[in-house]
Image: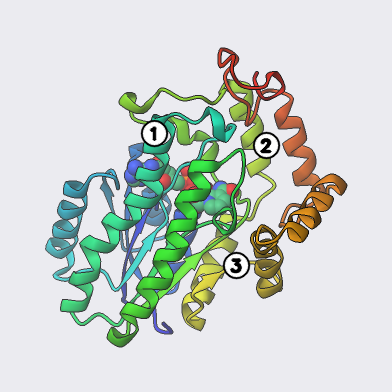
Amino acid sequence: MKEFKDKLALITGGGSGAGFGQAQILSEAGCRVVLADIRQDHLDQAMAHFRAAGAEARAIRMDITDREDYRKAAQQVEAWYGSCPDILVLTAGVNAFGPAEASTFEDFDWIINVNLFGVINGLVTFVPRMIQAGKQGHIVVTGSLGGLGGCPTTAPYSASKAAVINLCESYYEALKPYGIGVTCFCPGNMNTNIHEATMTRPENLRNTGYYESADSIEMYRRHNILGMDIREVGERTKKAMEEGVVLCIPYDEPEKMCADILQETVDYCTAEGIRRKEERDRSGSKNNSQDAAELKSLADARAVGFAAAKKDLSWIAEEKRF
Ligand code: NAI
C-alpha cells in the first residue's frame, strides 16, 4: 500500500499506546481515522489530539470481543463515510503476567478473547465488506515478538499472539488475489499503557491465578517506559504497509532477530537442541530484544511480585508465589 491520502482507516485500540501512534501517523499521511476502543477516557484523550491537529477523526466506543459491537461499528462507519474502511488496524490487546501453571480459565478466557477473538471478529466483520467494496486496502494486526515462542510467565498471551501471527499468514495468501495486503506487526516492549490492561478486565473474568498489586502494575509501567515510542510504532507500521511486509519485526536486522528467536523452537526438536537451549538458559544469553536496562527493570519488577502467582496457591512452588 503506497497511497494514504483520503483513505479511511479504522484502528482498534486507537485510543492509546500503539494504536494511537498508528492512528497519528496514518492521519498525518492523509488518512481519515476512526478510533475504536473500550475505554472512553482513552478515546477522549486521543480525539482531543486529533481535534487540536485539525484532523478528520471519529471515535467508536466498543468491545472487540463483542460481535454485535463490531457489526454496529461497521454500520456506523458506512453511515458516516458511505463505505467500509480501506485500512483495518487491529491493535487492541491486553496482557497479564504469572506462572503458566497458575493460569485460570478466566485468565485464558479474557486474554484469548481479546487478543485472538478480538482479531477474528474484526477480520470476519470487515474482510467480506472490503472485498465487496473492491477495496485494494491493507490489514494490520498487532501481534508481538512474544508470539514467536512460548513463555512460562505469559502463556495465554503468547498463545494468543502465536495464533494471530499464523492467522495473518493465512489471510495474506487468501487476500492477495483481491489486492488487500496483510501485515502482522510484532514488536517487543513499547512505551504504552498496557500495564493498565487489568482495568478493562470484565467482572465475570476477574478470577486470576496471578499476583497483582499497585506495586507490580507500577513496575510494569516502569518497564514499558523503556520501550519503543508510539510514533516510531506508527512510522514502522506505515513503512511495513508500504513495503508489503507480512511479518513486521520493527527493529534493525528483522530476519536475524526472527531466526534467533525461532531457534528456540527449532532447539526443541532434538535432545541435542534441548541441551543447547538449557546451556543458553544457564549462561543467561537469551536470544531476544531485551537490552540490559530492560532486563534490570524486569529483575526489579520481580521483587514486587511481578509475574508471580498468588500466595494462596499452595500447590505452586513457593519461590513462584508472592
Ligand atoms: P494500551 O493499553 O496502551 O492500548 C491498548 C488499547 O486497547 C487500550 O486503549 C484499551 O482500552 C484497548 N482495549 C483493550 N481491550 C479492549 C477491548 N476488549 N475492546 C476494545 N478495546 C480494547 O496497550 P498497547 O501496548 O498499545 O497494546 C496494543 C497492542 O500491542 C496489544 O495487542 C498488545 O498485545 C501489543 N503489544 C504490546 C507490547 C508492549 O510492550 N506494550 C509489546 C508487544 C505487543
Residue 123, can we see it?
yes
| Tags 1 and 2 touching, CB below 8 Å | no
The answer to whether residue 210 is left or right of residue 15 is: right
Write down the quadrant of residue 259 in the picture. Answer: bottom right
Amino acid carrying mark 2 in the image: Arg
Mark 3: few/some/many CA within 10 Å (<14, 14-19, 20+): many
Residue 42 x/y as whole percent = 40, 42
Amino acid carrying mark 1 in the image: Thr
Local secondary structure at mark 1: helix
- Residue at 66 percent across and 44 percent down: it is 225
Q: Nearer the viewer, mark 2 or mark 3?
A: 3
The N terminus sits in image quarter: bottom left
Give me the C-alpha separation between circle 2 and circle 3.
23 Å
User: Which residue is disc 2 drawn over?
Assistant: 222
Give me the C-alpha separation between circle 1 and circle 2.
20 Å
User: Which residue is disc 3 drawn over?
Assistant: 249
User: Which residue is disc 1 drawn over?
Assistant: 200
Q: Residue furthest front?
A: 271
Q: Name the residue nearer the viewer: 50 or 280.
A: 280
- Residue at 35 percent across and 44 percent down: it is 113
- Is 159 drawn above or below residue 40 in the view shown? below
Local secondary structure at mark 3: loop
Give me the C-alpha separation between circle 1 and circle 3.
27 Å
Q: Name the residue nearer the viewer: 315 or 5.
A: 315
Q: Nearer the viewer, mark 1 or mark 3?
A: 3
Does the beta carbon at disc 1 come under 8 Å from ligand 1? yes
